[in-house]
Image (tube, helix red, strand yellow):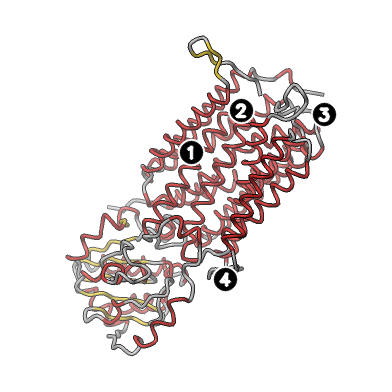
Amino acid sequence: MSAMIIMAGGVAVSPLVFQLAIFVLAIFVGYYVVWSVTPALHTPLMAVTNAISSVIIVGALVAVAAGTQGGSSISTWAGFAAVSLCAVNIFGGFLVTQRMLAMYKKRER
Amino acid sequence: MSLSSFALSANLAAVLYTVSAVLFILALRGLSSPETSRRGNTYGMIGIAIAIFTTILVAGFGGTGLLLIGGGMALGGIVGAIIAKKIPMTDMPQLIAAFHSLVGLAAVLVALAAFFSPDSFGILNADGLMKGGSLLELSLGAGIGAITFSGSLIAFAKLNGNMSGSPILLPARHVINILLGVAFFFLVGLMMSTGGTEPWMMWAVIAVTLVLGFTLIIPIGGADMPVVVSMLNSYSGWAAAALGFTLGNLALIITGALVGSSGAILSYIMCKAMNRSFISVILGGFGGDAASAADGDKEQRPVKRGSAEDAAFIMKNASKVIIVPGYGLAVAQAQHAIREMVDKLKEEGVDVSYAIHPVAGRMPGHMNVLLAEANVPYDEVFELEDINSEFSNTDVAFVIGANDVTNPAAKTDPTSPIAGMPILDVDKAATVLFVKRSLSPGYAGIDNDLFYRDNTMMLLSDAKKMVEEIIKAL
């Protein structure tokens, strides 16, 4: 997409390096956040991470846009298939997580 | 007809993607306690909605495009919603495996789409060849995605019982895997040096990694499936992140990193809970019939057997009981019966809690979900390290459907296959009631010394039937 230019000490830094920095920091955020998840909720954690990794649907949407506007028809159909698969995961993943989380109740006192 | 008049500026789009990434972090953060988890899940849904709408506005669709994506989302959404509503909680491990395979396949498809429309994805150099870095990202995204896809299919088949849970050892499997790995990197190098002008190379990358996914997971036994499912969860994240670089999409990069590290941590926790190294799990071959030949002479040792009435009497007169459930409980569908039994015991004034081993189910946290479904309050359910010290002042440990996770051999016998595995110290309780179908060894194929101890009473029966009989006797 648009190549932005980040200046560091007057020298242009490649967007790739910028993205790598974000990637590395996000791994650390993930590390600390996931360790704080209670083991009782590890199954919902897997279901919800599966749902959010389906954010790859943004790539599928771009593929359909690319394919239908002058790109290869392979892109159109691969994109369409990927949009459908991601939608299964997004709806399925979030709803099944919601269903699981609704079952966790405290003791009645 | 393009709707690009609505197109957002690239900067605003980047801000919105960051917002959705932050919402995903909050979704995971919410899972630190059941009270905050439901709100966290809502944050996740909002996050993905923002990412989708932002992309639709940025990409600028024509009429055909809108029709396709609308149709795809409706189709997939309906299927997903129905599955989420219908799936029994016992089938959660195979559902998650199936979902991972879909993310993997989606990653492959997105990489293919970018490869065949490089101009629209902005990954062309001025000379009309594809950028080397982008080709590397696409290959990694497609490759990891393909491994996730085919590996998860195998994991699904093993968990769902379409395939035997015992490891299938191909001859020279390590050589095959190494050759496939080398072939992958060779093809990626070739593709980068030719600027992506030869489509067969991309297809070959996908074919090689699809096969690699199969050959990696097939030799891994059913007992190690919790690790495999966590590992594939991690892979699906790394595949997403790789494509995030190609698309220059912050939401994808950050989410990929979150999911990747989440799956890696869960794999680590599962490995530690079984005292296995990650490498030995990946190399496969564990959990077969290897150990079953050795226990022939032990079968004759005397055991103390009891009836449901005996068990009811002992527990009614106890002041503290700890229930130790294992996967056998879920197989026998005895979760609701056990909660009913505990309710009766509580009416008698008995203090009852549950102890869960990290690998009690077929995936991390599976047993907690199954107990929650049976209306067991989560604050009566404890993890191994929180409850293990309590067994020494407990009157009765009621083990149901669990075996290896209670086996003292893990501590006493350094030659045992489960040596060093953290276990629940049920042998420290005054009395151990062990509900089991027969005296056969557990999943790891090891005899359990606990069966033959003086303070152990074996309740040999189907778990559900036994618990129902105990309820009647109470």
Given the image, on which type of amino acid does mark 1 rest?
A: Leu
* Residue A37 relative to residue B144: left or right: left
Separation (CA) of disc 4 from disc 2: 42 Å
- Whether callout 1 and callout 4 share a subunit is answered yes
Disc 1 and disc 4 in contact, CB within 8 angstroms = no
- Sort mark 4 into few (<14), some (14-19) or many (20+) by Cα contacts within 10 Å: some
Q: Which mark is residue B248?
A: 2
| Any part of residue B404 in sight | yes
| Closer to us: B37 or B442 | B442
Q: Nearer the viewer, mark 3 or mark 2?
A: 2
Disc 3 and disc 4 in contact, CB within 8 angstroms = no
- Whether callout 3 and callout 4 share a subunit is answered no
Residue in the image at 42% along x and 75% along y: B445
Separation (CA) of disc 1 from disc 2: 17 Å
* Residue beneath disc 4: B164
* Residue beneath disc 1: B258
User: Which chain is mark 4 on?
Assistant: B
